[in-house]
Image (cartoon, rainbow, N blue to C red):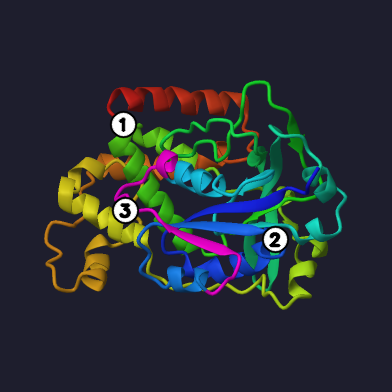
């Protein structure tokens, strides 16, 4: 039996801040890297084209659709004949460097067709000069030993790879998937502002549910935070790949897209969402200096602001690894139920 080819399937839209690091690391283990680019304007395409293992394809869709982009990536990979192992990673995700020495890598290569590969997902932060992490408490299915199964996923936060009924799971215990989304906290905040707007518009999700979901990683107990083990990054750094510095550009595409929502729908529609931690008038002046900032003042009432303060104050009881007193959690839930009846 011939050795399977390993593919990395990655959607990209303005990821120049981290893409070169991602491609350097991924090129060490992937035979082919397929990048689906959705109209990047920050140099992402030019970065991708520098790497010989990269196949760059265009995603011409205007809106956000995980089913469209994942089907596009999967179809491109399946144009190559023969056995394949597919990994679906975002540009801010990195296999820990111990894949170079871990026997788990051999177990991936020898897994039967139809096997789904699950992996732990440590969230990486930069604390002064150290990289630290905490685990997002889930096993993320990001790999698949391809058997041509159909892939179905949802609009957002859906399955990245096919998961056929009755499929075998191979859950890795040594190799992890480092998620770098928190290393630039301003980028992360911009991103979750957009997520809330998008899901509120398209999926009609309630503001409180969106707040609780997208702020789970706030107020994490220091007891679950640890320094990144040296074996996670040494293999990369020995090959000259910088895994610690952060390229903070301070201008994020999600802010532009939220401003587009304001232009189309007005600000009143979004007043209950937790997106008013920035001065949108100032941002529009910076991003679109040719336009007037009229109409972008904070639309929240005093009551709205009070609810947002309450959500932030109580979030420690809803964050990852929280263990609140049961009576307090019950009281919070009763308040939330009442607020939801008022449109929250």
Query: Where residue 163 appears, x then y in whole percent?
Result: 61, 30
Residue appearing at x 56%, y 64% in the figure: 54
Q: Secondary structure at mark 2?
A: strand
The residues colored magenta run: 50-68
Q: Secondary structure at mark 3?
A: loop
Which quarter of the picture shows residue 171? top right
Q: Residues within 10 Å of mark 2 (few under 14, many from 20)?
A: some
340 in relation to 113, above or below? above
Question: Tag 1 or tag 2, which sits nearer the N-term?
Answer: 2
Q: Residues within 10 Å of mark 3 (few under 14, many from 20)?
A: some
Query: Where residue 173 appears, x then y in whole percent?
Result: 80, 43
Please name which of the two marks, 2 or 1, marks the residue nearer to the observer: 1
Q: Tell me, for residue 273, which label it has, or none.
A: none
The residue pinned by badge 2 equals: 132
Q: Exactly how many numbered labels are in the figure?
A: 3
239 in relation to 93, above or below? below
Please name which of the two marks, 3 or 2, marks the residue nearer to the observer: 2
């Amino acid at each position: 039996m011939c050795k399977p080819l390993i593919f990395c399937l990655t959607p990209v839209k303005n990821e120049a801040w981290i893409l070169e690091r991602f491609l350097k690391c991924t090129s060490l283990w992937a035979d082919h890297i397929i990048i689906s680019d959705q109209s990047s304007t920050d140099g992402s395409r030019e970065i991708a084209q520098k790497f010989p293992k990269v196949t760059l394809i265009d995603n011409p869709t205007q809106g956000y659709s995980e089913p469209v982009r994942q089907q596009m990536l999967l179809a491109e990979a399946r144009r190559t004949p023969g056995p394949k192992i597919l990994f679906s990673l975002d540009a801010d995700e990195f296999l820990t460097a111990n894949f170079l020495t871990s026997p788990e890598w051999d177990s991936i290569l020898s897994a039967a067709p139809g096997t789904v590969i699950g992996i732990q997902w440590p969230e990486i932060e930069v604390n002064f000069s150290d990289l630290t992490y905490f685990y997002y408490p889930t096993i993320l299915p990001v790999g698949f030993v391809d058997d041509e199964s159909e892939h179905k996923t949802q609009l957002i936060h859906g399955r990245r790879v096919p998961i056929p009924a009755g499929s075998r799971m191979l859950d890795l215990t040594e190799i992890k998937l480092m998620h770098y989304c928190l290393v630039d906290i301003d980028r992360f905040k911009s991103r979750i502002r957009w997520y809330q707007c998008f899901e509120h518009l398209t999926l009609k999700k309630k503001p409180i549910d969106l707040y609780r979901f997208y702020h789970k990683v706030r107020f994490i107990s220091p007891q679950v935070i640890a320094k990144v083990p040296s074996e996670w990054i040494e293999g990369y750094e020995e090959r000259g790949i910088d895994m610690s510095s952060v390229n903070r550009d301070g201008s994020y595409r999600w802010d532009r897209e939220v401003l587009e929502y304001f232009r189309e729908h007005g600000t009143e529609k979004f007043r209950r969402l937790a997106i008013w931690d920035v001065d949108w008038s100032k941002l529009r002046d910076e991003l679109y200096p040719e336009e007037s900032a009229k109409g972008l003042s904070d639309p929240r009432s005093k009551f709205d602001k009070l609810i947002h303060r309450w959500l932030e104050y109580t979030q420690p009881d809803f964050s990852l690894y929280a263990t609140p007193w049961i009576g307090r959690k019950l009281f919070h839930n009763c308040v939330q139920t009442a607020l939801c009846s008022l449109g929250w």
